[in-house]
Amino acid sequence: MRKIKITLSVIFTLPVFIPTVILAILSCIFSVLGMKKAAEKWLHFWLYITIWWIWVCFGASFRVEGKENIPSKGCRVCYIANHLSMMDIPAIFYAGLWSGVIGKVELKKILGLNIVMKELNCVYIDRKSIKESLKAILEGAENIKKGIAMTIFPEGTRSKDMEMGSFKAGSFKMATKAKAEIVPVVIFNTRYLFENKKYFIKRVPVLVKILAPVKTENMSEEELRNVPDLVENMIRSEYEKLKSGFDV
């Protein structure tokens, strides 16, 4: 069954993935020529079309709640979300939360995807190395200080049983060092789009819920220490509510 899923995934996504890589390369060229804003705009537009096509192919019925909680442009922003599926990053982008993503270092080896991630200001993290993990967090913090929004999944890995794992407190250093607004994001049901999907013809309702921001800029040291628990509890509370009322 897994081989069938992978084969169908390649068939469905290849027609849009290849143009996306080409556009990412062009975006890189435009950036070098000083046309960064235009390059970013077109890359986002095409990625939106690509993700829409993925939702169509995988039968996603997509909904976003809480868009009013997205900080205005110019703010230092860090999106923090739970992690269920390889579809979580497309879900984040499709919800309008354009950002660099802290992704596992293995993604750097995937030709094409690594070009797209570079243009999106993503940062690779090697969780097996404390030194490299810290380096990635600090790089992400510098991006935020420059006005580039970042996304991180503090569980560190995808949940395979739909149960949220514990958040790693160190993941929040990226936001607190940059004195960013932390925007908690609840992702629900993406795992049933691919990893746990039994029938490709079945529609899957997917929800991205954006919660009220937590502003860290003027927090005391004690308040900053409590931020990981505060944000985790916000996301976990909403996630548990959704578990009891969502059709999979």
Image (cartoon, grey):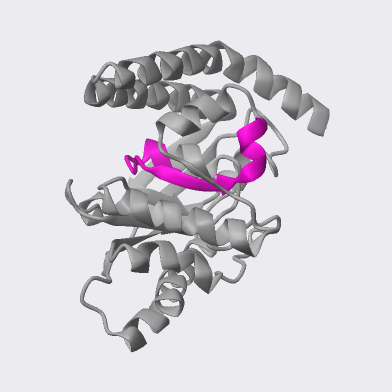
Residue 235 on the magenta span: no
Observer-nearest residue: 39 or 240?
Answer: 39
Q: Residue at x 35, y 46 (%)?
A: 64
Q: Residue at x 41, y 71 (%)?
A: 231
Disc count in the image?
0
Quadrant in which the N terminus is drawn? top right
Observer-nearest residue: 23 or 235?
Answer: 23
Residue 66 seen by the camera: no
Residue 106 on the magenta span: yes
Q: Residue 198 location, x and y as percent?
A: 73, 38
Q: Residue at x 48, y 58 (%)?
A: 137
Left or right of residue 18: residue 150: left
Compared with 226, 163 (above or below) is above
Compared with 186, 201 (above or below) is above
Q: Residue 50 location, x and y as percent?
A: 46, 22
Q: Residue at x 35, y 67 (%)?
A: 177
Residue 202 seen by the camera: yes
Q: Residue 176 location, x and y as percent?
A: 35, 69
Magenta highlight range: 92-109
Observer-nearest residue: 18 or 12?
Answer: 18
Observer-nearest residue: 158 or 32?
Answer: 32
Compared with 8, 191 (above or below) is below
Compared with 75, 221 (above or below) is below
Find residue 86 and report its image quarter.
top right
Outermost residue, bottom direction? 222
